[in-house]
Image (cartoon, rainbow, N blue to C red):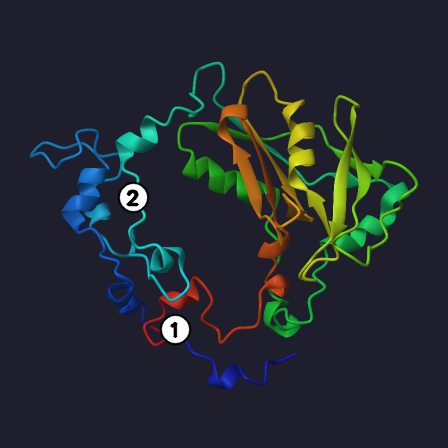
Amino acid sequence: MTNPDAKDACKHTSLYLDVSPHASKAGFKRPNKRQRISAATQEGRVLKEIELLTCKELVEDEMAFPGPLVLPGDDLAEDPESPPQDFNEWRDEEERNPVTQERKTIYIVSSPLIEKSLSKMQAWSVCSSRNSAKKQDTEAVSPPDIRDIVEYLSAFFYGMDVKIFKQPFHWQKWDSYEGAVLKSSNTEKRIGLRTPSEELFGIRCRASPDGVSPMQVNLNDVLDALAENIPSDAHSIMILLDQDMYEGDGDIFCAGRAYGGSRIAAVSKFRDQPLCAPRDNGHAWPSSHCAAYI
């Protein structure tokens, strides 16, 4: 099916790589190139003989490191005085989990398999919002394969091993609840999450407050289950969920949470589905870097 608005769609022919004009109105001033290079060094200043993991030419390349747009409503627009984090502050973080020869592997856990007893849960990973993007605009987009995610993380965490956790987790019934979509987000039920060690954890779930997802699972409960299954050689372990998540009663949703000191993380892929994206004028990030839009 062809999008009737396609002929009028912006082609994004020119990129805008600096802060937007709104940045100055918000009171944000972007650090200059020298300040940015200084922040990436152990010495905190630019020396004649300087060694950077990222070469100086790339740091100065706007295509490699574009500026934050600072558009209305962005975090930096709301809090332009938020202190930046330089290399030394990042390195000296007290809760940092050290990388050692014994623990240098990042494990990625696929979304748990759904048992037949909880087959109604299959619908939880399907976007249900009426305000979502048009289906014809997203038909060509396939969900990322876990092997692609591993490849990306391997490049990001250069020098560390990134592996798929081979032993599957399973969703199953906890009690009599069979996974039917609840009518109110104020009502919580529990489903079971069975780990590779055959332990069964009760995971709270509820209807989504904003209606984008049919149901959500509680990320803290998921992390409790994950924490009991950390391999001995793991630097950290992350579980990817097809389902939407929430953390507390006041949350609309929570895309993910990592506890570095505990070496665990949970990330939901649900809201990254193009169908879950709100309708826009074609300039949602990263297309917001279009010069015509700015």
Answer left or right for 160 relative to 206: left
Residue drawn at point x = 65 percent, y = 36 percent: 220
Q: Quadrant of residue 158?
A: top left
* Residue 165: x %, y % from top left: 64, 29
Residue drawn at point x = 47 percent, y = 80 percent: 9
Answer left or right for 228 relative to 51: right
Helix or strand or loop: what does disc 2 sit on?
Answer: loop
* Residue 117: x %, y % from top left: 90, 42
* Residue 262: x %, y % from top left: 54, 25
Between discs 1 and 2, the one toward the N terminus: 1
Residue type at mark 1: give it: His
Helix or strand or loop: what does disc 1 sit on?
Answer: loop
Residue designated by label 2:
84
* Residue 234: x %, y % from top left: 55, 22
Whether 252 is drawn above or below 169: the answer is below
Q: Residue 273 carries which label?
A: none
Say few, some or many: other residues with alpha carbon within 10 Å of mark 1 (under 14 / 14 to 19 / 20 or more): some
Residue type at mark 2: give it: Pro
Q: Which mark is residue 12?
A: 1
Determine if residue 280 is in view. yes
